[in-house]
Image (cartoon, rainbow, N blue to C red):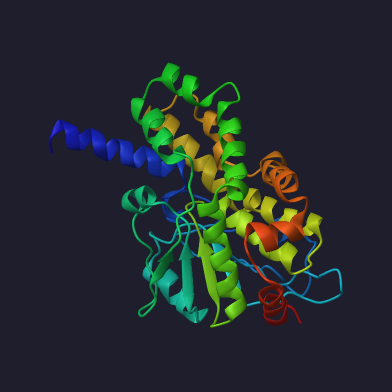
Amino acid sequence: MSRARTRLATVVLASALALGALPASAYAGPASPSPAAVPRDRVADPGRPVPLQGAVNVRDLGGYRTYTGGLVRQGLVYRSDALGRLTDADVATLAGLRLTGVVDFRIPTEVQYDGADRLPAGLSPTARPVSDLGLYATLVTAIGSGDPATQERMLGGGRAEAYMRDIYRTFVTSPENRAQFAATLREVADGRGPLLVHCTSGKDRTGWLAYVLLRALAVPEDRAARDYLASNTYRAAYDAALRAGLKQSGRMQNPDLLIPLQEVRTDYLAAATDRMEADYGGFYRYLTEGLGLDLRTLARLRARMVR
């Protein structure tokens, strides 16, 4: 293999490590948290994790109570991290969910490096890329450099956290991003069958879509936020192992620089919701004006998803 190809392979591997794109079998730990670790603000075994070997943040969005006493139906919307490294057994598990659609929020570069989704026969993903403001390329550069000073300059001193807050603001400010989220919510409302939504780690773009969907269904804001924050529980062991792998490989002396990029945080969510308040004056106007969802669509969404 040429020196250039060797370096490219190293950079791709490092990027995959940083972004949680390796299979769960690559570390010694559970693919999903124990029941005791899952937030207890749900009812009737809600938000059930879907145990897979090649993905660690896969769960059903159903089971939350709404303000009106309704219950979000299970088995209709699932959220996940990337599906490119699923095992044959994982694909069989997905087949059992009887999915009729998969929405992929990754940008083309992520798909190129991480691989296309592995899905049951007859099922193809719908690409709805949501911008990461160049974060993936930044990680490739930082990790690929192997230089602690470069990595500190690019990710340290609060820069990683600021990057994440900027990304979350674009969930609200970018017309292109809003269009992708709106199209997905309309697909849920149309009710053709169970839908799975994912990005690379299943926590930011997917987390925002899940948060907006739950709130649109009249799930209390604090419970929608807890669902968002639960990604930290599902991903904790896996992400820690990835950091350890980067340190052991010598690619990063201080892999903790990645923690702000691996985690979800209340201030990231607040960056989006604060922008939403500033631009639209509230959640309802964000739905109707920002996402362009009319009252009939919102009514169909609740009729289908809440019992």
Quarter of image, res 106? bottom left
Left or right: where 92 falls relative to 215: left
Q: Residue at x 69, y 61 (%)?
A: 287
186 and 230: which is toward the camera: 186
Measured as percent of width and height from the top left, residue 265 is found at 68, 42
Measured as percent of width and height from the top left, residue 237 is found at 57, 47
Q: Is residue 225 visible?
A: yes
253 and 118: which is toward the camera: 118
Left or right: where 134 falls relative to 6: right
Whether 26 is drawn above or below 145: the answer is below
Q: Residue at x 42, y 20 (%)?
A: 150
Left or right: where 78 falls relative to 242: right
176 and 249: which is toward the camera: 176
Quadrant in which the C terminus appears:
bottom right
Quadrant in which the N terminus appears:
top left
Residue lying furthest top: 149
Whether 151 is drawn above or below 7: the answer is above
Residue lying furthest right: 68
Q: Residue at x 77, y 53 (%)?
A: 282
Q: Is residue 33 visible?
A: no
How many marks the image carries: the answer is: 0
Q: Residue at x 53, y 59 (%)?
A: 179
Measured as percent of width and height from the top left, residue 270 is found at 72, 43
Measured as percent of width and height from the top left, residue 273 is found at 72, 47
